[in-house]
Image (spheres, helix red, strand yellow):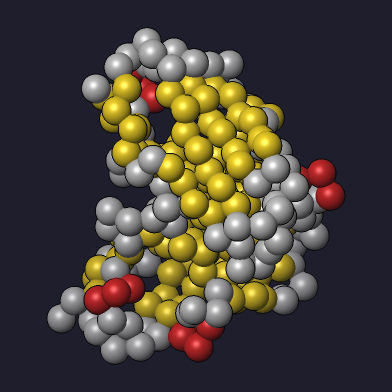
Amino acid sequence: DIVMTQSPATLSVSPGERATLSCRASQSVSSNLAWYQQKPGQAPRLLIYGASTRATGIPARFSGSASGTEFTLTISSLQSEDFAVYYCQQYNNWPPFTFGQGTKLEIK
Amino acid sequence: QVQLQESGPGLVKPSQTLSLTCTVSGGSITSGDYYWSWIRQPPGKGLEWIGYIYFSGDTYYNPSLKSRVSISMDTSKNLFSLNVNSLTAADTAVYYCARVSGSSSFYGLIDYWGQGTLVTVSS
């Protein structure tokens, strides 16, 4: 199974600043990588798919990029509603689907 | 707009069997364009994929749970179900049902999730 490793586990950033979250795959997943945002008590929400395509209704401040097996989610100017847990997930080699362990983005 | 809604007991005793249902609206589970999946999340922890069922009835289960899990579907009611037997406290989690794309452009993308239902395993 492909292992997805996210870093850091917790990221403290001030509102208005940029946040950069990382996700590494244990082997190639091509561009079949998704990012999800999860707020307390809610289901994950699809943010990015295909490593860099924003899902419907996702603000432009969210962007995704890839370099080999390294993936990055960037939030350009943090809003209060962006503080949440973010998960990456590969859908290149499935089943099984595999998720990263999550990065908690908290207010500094 | 597709919607998925989980239902089932919130509390189950150890060693018993959990049965959950996911009712789908806004789309048919008999569409060959999608796989219907279950995912769970223990409190304060990450996401664990459980398995899926396809419109043909084909299923696939996470090897870590395969011996205790089964997924079925009821096309007349447009729903699919999850059974987990031999429950322990480690099965306490929020259980989500989800739709997985089977179309070539988005093959494997999890595009819709239910709101989730918390299941506690305790005597």
- Quarter of the rendering occupied by the C terminus of chain B: bottom left
- Relative to A72, does residue A24 appear above or below in the rendering? below
Query: As drawn, which residue projects farthest toward the top?
Result: A16
Q: Is residue A80 left or right of residue A6?
A: left
Count of marks, rendered view: 0
- Quarter of the rendering occupied by the N terminus of chain B: top right
In the rendering, at what x and y percent does residue B103 appear?
Answer: 81, 50
Q: Residue at x 66, y 76 (%)?
A: B59
Query: As drawn, which residue projects farthest toward the right?
Result: B104
Query: As drawn, which residue projects farthest toward the left?
Result: B123
Q: Residue at x 76, y 52 (%)?
A: B107
Visible in this render: residue A72? yes
Q: Residue at x 60, y 52 (%)?
A: A25
- Relative to B42, does residue A28 appear above or below in the rendering? above
Q: Is residue B1 left or right of residue A50?
A: left
**Camera-side residue of A3 and A46:** A3
Visible in this render: residue A55? no
In the rendering, at what x and y percent does residue A72 appear?
Answer: 56, 33
**Camera-side residue of A33 and A43:** A33
The image quadrant of residue A106 is top left
In the rendering, at what x and y percent does residue A36 appear?
Answer: 51, 40
Q: Is residue B16 left or right of residue B32?
A: left
In the rendering, at what x and y percent does residue A104 appear?
Answer: 34, 38
